[in-house]
Image (cartoon, rainbow, N blue to C red):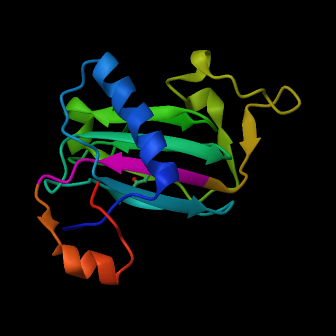
């Protein structure tokens, strides 16, 4: 992957993510990659692993609405965890779970009673109901790409980047 600088607003968020990961003693290099996904209600992401191009510590910030993330075993696709990614939350996928599959189902609502983190959620129940309607969710997923290449300074300048972060 080619290195280009993060925009200013992401640099600030990235340094907070870094601070958090260091405090929790996660062993990961600099987060040099961010993927921004937008999910409208009813949209999700199919079961997948992030693979060997990244270090196995991935940090995701959720904004907008929440979504339930399932972790499935690679072997028989059984759901072993469901975590509700609520707005404002930072979630970290690491360790043994990194190599299993994760997915977000294409639903219009999420049953948060299924969530392993149910008791630590701050999301209020909707009318005492465990089903939370989806709102558009935008996630920021920070990763460490193990192998990157620098672009020549002249090319960065042509592309309007002043420096590489
Ligand atoms: O948006 C999320 O929370 C998950 C994103 C994800 O799994 C991916 O982009 O590979």
Q: Judge whether residue 83 can be spotted in this image.
A: yes
Between 53 and 100, the residue placed more toward the observer is 53
Front residue of 119 and 28: 28
Quarter of the image for residue 107 reads bottom right
Q: Nearer the viewer, residue 12 or 131?
A: 12
Relative side of 52 to 18, left or right: left
Residue at the spot 59% in from the left edge and 54% down from the top edge: 138
Q: Name the residue at 39% across, 57% down.
A: 6
Residue 44 visible within the image: no
- Splitting the image into 4 quarters, where does residue 131 fall? top right
Give the magenta part as a residue range: 138-146
Percent x, y of residue 67: 59, 45
Q: Is residue 42 left or right of residue 61?
A: right
Residue 118 higher or lower than 43, as above or below: above
- Residue 16: image x %, image y %? 44, 32
Identify the residue at image location x=30%, y=62%.
Answer: 163
**Does residue 143 belong to the magenta stretch?**
yes
Residue sticking out furthest to the right: 127
The quarter of the picture where the C terminus appears is bottom left
Please identify the dominant SS of the magenta region: strand
Residue 81: quadrant of the picture = top left
Residue 74 magenta: no
Measured as percent of width and height from the top left, residue 24 is found at 32, 18
Q: Position of residue 85 (x, y in %)?
A: 55, 38
């Amino acid at each position: 992957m080619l290195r280009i600088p993060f925009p200013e607003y992401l640099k600030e968020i990235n340094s907070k993510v870094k601070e958090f990961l260091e405090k929790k003693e996660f062993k990961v290099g600099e987060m040099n990659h961010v993927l921004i996904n937008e999910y409208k209600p009813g949209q999700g992401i199919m079961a997948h692993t992030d693979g060997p191009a990244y270090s196995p510590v991935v940090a995701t910030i959720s904004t907008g609405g929440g979504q339930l993330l399932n972790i499935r075993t690679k072997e028989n696709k059984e759901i072993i965890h469901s975590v509700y990614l609520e707005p404002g939350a930072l979630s970290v996928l690491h360790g043994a779970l990194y190599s299993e599959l994760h997915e977000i189902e294409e639903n219009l609502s999420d049953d948060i009673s299924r969530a392993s983190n149910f008791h630590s959620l701050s999301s209020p129940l909707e009318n005492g109901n465990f089903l939370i309607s989806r709102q558009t969710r935008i996630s920021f997923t920070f990763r460490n790409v193990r192998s990157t290449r620098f672009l020549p300074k002249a090319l960065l300048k042509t592309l309007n980047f002043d420096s590489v972060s």
